[in-house]
Amino acid sequence: MLRELRIENLLLIERAELRLGPGLNVLTGETGAGKTVLAHSLDLLMGGKAKKGIVRAGAPEAWVEGVFDLPPEWNQDEELAELLDRIPAGSEDVVLGRRVSESGRTSAFLGGRSASAADLQLLATRLIAFYGQHEHRRLTIGSAQLAMVDGSAGLGQQQRLGEYREVWRRHRGLERELEELRGRDMARERDLDLHRFELDEIEAAALVEGEKETLAEERDRLRHAEGLREAAAGAGIRLRGDEDADGAVGLLAGARDSLNGLRGVDAGLDELAGRVESLALEVEDVGQELGRYLESVEADPERLAGLEERLDLIDRLERKHGGSVESVLAHADWCREEIARLEGGETREAELRDQIAAAAAELEKSSAALSEARRKAAGELAASVTADLEDLAMPGAELTIDLPPTTDGPGPSGAESAEFMLAPNPGIPAQPLRDTASGGELSRVMLALAASGAGDRRTLVFDEIDAGIGGNTAAAVGERLRGVADGRQVIAITHLPQVASRAATHFSVEKAAGEGTVAATVTALDEEAVVAEIRRMMGAAEGDETATRHARELVAANR
C-alpha cells in the first residue's frame, strides 16, 4: 500500500503531502488545476522518463517520494535480494524517490540511497498497477491482451511461460547455429583447403629446429672452398717450407738446436730454449692440421645448390609464418587443430539436427501445456469480465477471448495470439475490441479486467478511467471501484461525483493565481469539504442549498 506521497515543485505543485489510506482514494479538481500531477508523480516513481517542462517554473528541481508498505513476501524473492539490502534492517517501509533537475536530468533513490530508474521500475511495478488513458490503446494491442490472459492465470502460468520461453530460446539458438554452420560451408571448405595446403607444405619440408644455422655454415664453406684451400695451402708451405726455403718449422728447429747446445749453463737461456721448443711443437702441429683441413675442403657445386635450395625453402616458410623455424612449426600445429575443428563441422551438424529434434519435441510439449492453461484462463477471464460488465451498465454485453494460432509457428510468447472480442449489445456479433468499443466501453472493460486480478494485491491507480461516461453508468463504475477497493488500495483521479462520493479518502487539487505565478495545492478533505467538492463537481455554485443537500445525500448514500 502507498501510505505517503510527497511532491515538491512538480508542474503547478510547490509542495504537497498526501497521506493515503486503504480502500478507495480519490483525487478531484477543476480541469487544469493539476490533477495529472499524481499520474506524473507515480510514473516517475515507477522509473518513467521525465517529461519536458515537468519542473515547476522558477524552481531548480522537482522531487517526488513515495512511502510504501514493505510486502512480507519480498523477503523470499531472490530477484529483489540485492535491492532489499539497501533498505535499513528492521524497516517495514519501502521509500522510493526521484529528483528531476530543470535540465531534465534525473536521480533515483531507494531507502535514501542512490539507485537507478530500472531499480525503481522493478520495485514499483510490483507495488502499483497503473491504469491511465494510454491504457485504452494498450488494451487493444494483441500482445498486451495475451499478457492479460496469462496474468489472470496466476503464478503457475507465469512459471509455465518462463519455462516455455527458456525452451523456445534454446530451440531457436540451435536452429540459428545450424543456419550459421550451413552458411559457413563454403568458407569452411576454403579454409580447409588453405590449411591443408599449408600443412602439407610444412610437413613436406620436414623442418628441424636449429638446422638453418648448421646449413648456413656449410653453405658458406662451400661458397668459399677455393679460397679456403688456397689460404690453407699457402699457410702450410710457410710453416713446413719447400725445396727453395725453410719454413717456420725448420727455422724453429734450427733455433731450438742452437739453444739446446748450451742447456744447463744459464737458467734464463734455458727458459727461452723451452719456449722455443714449445713453439716448434705447436707450429709443427698446426702445419699438420692445415694439411688435414686442406684435404677436407673440396668444391661441391651439387651439394652447394642443394643447400641453397633448402635454405631458400626455410626462408620462404619463415616469411609466411612468423619469421623463425619455431613459428613455422607452431603454425603447423595450429593448422592441424583448425583442420580437426573444421572437419568436425559435419559431425556438429548431425549433433545439431538431433538436438533440434529433441528441443522441438520439448517445445511442443511446453507449448501445449501453455496453450491449455491459456484456454482455461481465457474462458474464466471472459466470463468474469462479462459478469462485471453487467454491473457496469452494459447489460447483455459479452466479452470473448479468441486464441488463434500464430501464423509463423511458436514464437517467444507461445503458439497463439489473443484477440479480445466484444459484443456490446445482445444480438450484435462480437467484433475485435479495437474496432467496436467506444471510449466509455473501453473504460468499463478495463475496470472489469483490473477487478479480475485474482491474488494481485498491488495498489490500483486509475487516471480518469471514467472518461466518456456519466449518469447511471458513472454510478455503476463508482460502485465497482469501491468493490474492487474492498480489502486493497485503489487510487482514482476522477471528474465524476458518482465516483468521488464513494471514496474513503478524498483529496482535492485547487489552482490559485498569484503575482505572475499560478500554483496548485492538494488538500485532504474532511466530511464537510467533501460535500462542498461533490457539489462543485455537480456543477452547482457555493450558495446552492439544494445542490448542497443533494451532494450530502449522495455522499451519505454511498458511504
Image: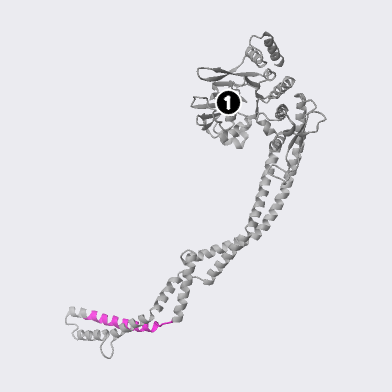
The image quadrant of residue 216 is bottom left
- Give whichever of 523, 208 is nearer the camera: 523
The image quadrant of residue 228 is bottom left
- What is the secondary structure assignment of the residue under circle 1? strand
- Horizontally, residue 308 falls left or right of residue 550, namely left
Report the magenta residues as a range: 273-300
- Horizontally, residue 269 falls left or right of residue 49, namely left
Rendering coords of residue 415 (x, y %): 73, 43
Q: Quadrant of the C terminus?
A: top right
Q: Please name the residue that numbered disc 1 is placed on.
A: 67
Q: Is residue 111 visible?
A: no
As drawn, 104 above or below 202: above
- Give whichever of 551, 214 is nearer the camera: 551
Furthest residue to the left? Answer: 265
Q: Is residue 351 visible?
A: yes
Q: Is residue 284 found inside the magenta-colored segment of the image? A: yes
- Count of numbered badges drawn on the protein: 1
- Give whichever of 58, 159 is nearer the camera: 58
Q: Is residue 324 found inside the magenta-colored segment of the image? A: no
As drawn, 352 above or below 325: above
Rendering coords of residue 492 (x, y %): 65, 23
Q: Main secondary structure of the magenta part?
A: helix
Rendering coords of residue 129 (x, y %): 65, 30
Q: Which three-letter amino acid code belongs to the residue tagged 1?
A: Val
**Which residue is at 73% across, 19% downward?**
471
**Which residue is at 60% across, 17% downward?**
524
Q: Quadrant of the N terminus?
A: top right
Rendering coords of residue 521 (x, y %): 56, 19
Report the colour scheme. Answer: one colour
- Horizontally, residue 351 falls left or right of residue 316, namely right
